[in-house]
Each structure stands twice: as C-alpha cells, then as structure tokens.
Image (cartoon, grey):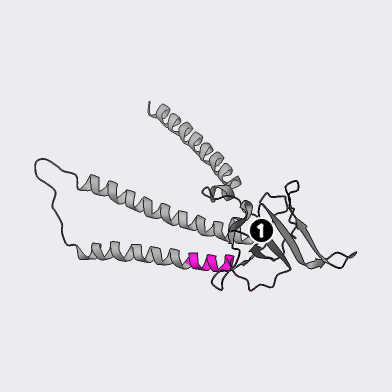
C-alpha cells in the first residue's frame, strides 16, 4: 500500500516537473513579450527606454500588491474572531503608522525619479542629429523637407508634399539620430507614428514655452503608417 502510494507520488512529481520545465521553456522563449505587460512594441531607442520604465513600474506594483494581499490574508487568518470575545484591538501604533507613511512616499519618489530620467532621455536633443527633417502640417496633410539633402538636378532641398490623391512618404535612416522640426500653417495638428510611441502637438505659432523639436533613433526597419 505504501509502495503504491509512493509510486503515484513519484509519477505525479515527475509529471509536475515536466510541466514546469515545459512552461519554463515557453516562458523563456516569450520572456521579452511577457515583460512588456501589455506595452506595445516600439521601433526606437526611446520607445525601448519607455518600455523598461513600464516593466519595472509594473513589477514594483505587483510586489506591492502581493505584499498587501499577503498582509490582508495574514490579518484575516491570525486575527479572526474566535468565540464570543473580540480579538485584542490595537490603536495608535506609531511604528506601523510611520511605516505606511514613509514607504509609499519612497515608492512615489523612486518612480518620479526614474520617470524624470526617462522623459529627459526621450526629449533629449543633445546628441547631434545625423539628419534633420522639417515637418509642416496643413489641412489636411503634411509636407516633409529634408534639410540636409539636395536634388542633384536642381540643387534644391528634397521635399515631399501630400495631397488629396497622394499620401506623403517620410524616409529616415535606420540606427541614426533623426531630428524633427515641426510646424503648422493653419491650426493645431498632432504628428504621430504610433510605433514610435511618441506624439508631438504641432502649433501654428509656437511660443518660447513650446518645444517644436524632438529626436528619435529608429532601430527596426519597416514601413509604418502615421
């Protein structure tokens, strides 16, 4: 009887180990996608940096959530009512009150710090651009001017203009710093290629408080709709 039970336990253990190994192999293969936690796949260095911030923020939230859930279940079990007497009531526990005041503040401070660092990286214009594109918005299309590319036949700057029958195509190099200088001829527009995970509003008359430049470094070759 004991030998049969031991055999069943051994078979179950082996099956469980095989299942864990199988799931582990799948998780290793899809680890990158799993760590996105729903974050879309970006095509620039800046998008990757934002994804890292999102991943670690989510991990921190899960850790805090697990801790809170554990404390809730622990308190529910340890301090549950037994018999007719209420459990001992504790009030004005200064160490605990200080703990749940200081710890959330530290969490928010750390998240704010890394958010500021990531935002600074995403909006940084200090790396010299390898190419610069002037983006002009108008109803209901776009014009792209390549400020460092000239047509050898006319010696004029290369540009493309969209129309009601033609969609303008913006071509940028891979693994190069591309600076965009955006502007508008009429009303407020928004320049956005979703795969870059970055959008910049375009104003007709930007003031000194409105930044009309940003920089991206595409790392994935492909065609993307804006």
Q: Is residue 147 visible?
A: yes
Residue 176 horizontal/vertical position (percent): 72, 64
Residue at (83% x, 67% y) in the render: 156
Which structural element holds mark 1? strand
Residue 132 horizontal/vertical position (percent): 72, 67
Query: Is 191 in front, or is 3?
Result: 191
From this viewpoint, which residue is outermost toward the front?
A: 186
**Boundaries of the magenta span:** 114-127
Q: Is residue 73 above or below residue 205?
A: above
Q: Is residue 215 magenta?
A: no
Q: Is residue 129 above or below residue 16?
A: below
The quarter of the displayed image where residue 181 is located: bottom right
Query: Is 162 in front, or is 176?
Result: 162
Residue at (60% x, 51% y) in the render: 41
Question: Relative to residue 27, is residue 156 drawn left or right?
Answer: right
Query: Is 51 in front, or is 151?
Result: 151
Question: Relative to residue 189, is residue 178 drawn left or right?
Answer: right
The residue carrying pointer 1 sits among few (fewer than 14), some (14 to 19) or many (20 or more) residues within 10 Å by Cα, namely many
Question: Relative to residue 175, is residue 209 drawn left or right?
Answer: left
From this viewpoint, which residue is outermost toward the left?
A: 84
**Quadrant where the N terminus is found in the figure:** top left
User: Count of labels shown?
Assistant: 1
Residue 201 horizontal/vertical position (percent): 58, 60
Residue at (58% x, 43% y) in the render: 25
Q: Is residue 125 magenta?
A: yes
Q: Which residue is mark 1?
A: 137
Q: Is residue 48 visible?
A: no
Q: Main secondary structure of the magenta part?
A: helix
């Amino acid at each position: 009887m004991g030998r049969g039970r031991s055999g069943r336990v051994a078979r179950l253990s082996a099956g469980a180990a095989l299942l864990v190994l199988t799931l582990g192999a799948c998780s290793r293969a899809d680890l990158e996608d799993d760590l996105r936690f729903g974050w879309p796949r970006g095509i620039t260095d800046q998008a990757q940096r934002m994804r890292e911030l999102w991943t670690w923020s989510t991990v921190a939230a899960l850790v805090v959530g697990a801790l809170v859930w554990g404390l809730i279940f622990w308190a529910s079990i340890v301090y549950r009512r037994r018999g007719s007497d209420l459990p001992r009531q504790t009030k004005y526990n200064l160490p605990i009150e200080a703990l749940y005041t200081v710890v959330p503040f530290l969490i928010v401070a750390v998240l704010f710090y890394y958010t500021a660092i990531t935002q600074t990286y995403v909006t940084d214009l200090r790396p010299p651009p390898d190419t610069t594109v002037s983006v002009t918005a108008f109803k209901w299309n776009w014009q792209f001017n390549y400020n460092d590319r000239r047509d050898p036949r006319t010696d004029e700057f290369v540009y493309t203009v969209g129309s009601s029958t033609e969609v303008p195509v913006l071509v940028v190099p891979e693994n190069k710093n591309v600076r965009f200088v955006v502007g508008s001829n009429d009303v407020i527009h928004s320049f956005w290629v979703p795969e870059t995970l970055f959008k910049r509003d375009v104003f007709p008359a930007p003031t000194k408080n409105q930044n009309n430049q940003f920089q991206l470094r595409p790392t994935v070759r492909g065609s993307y709709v804006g």
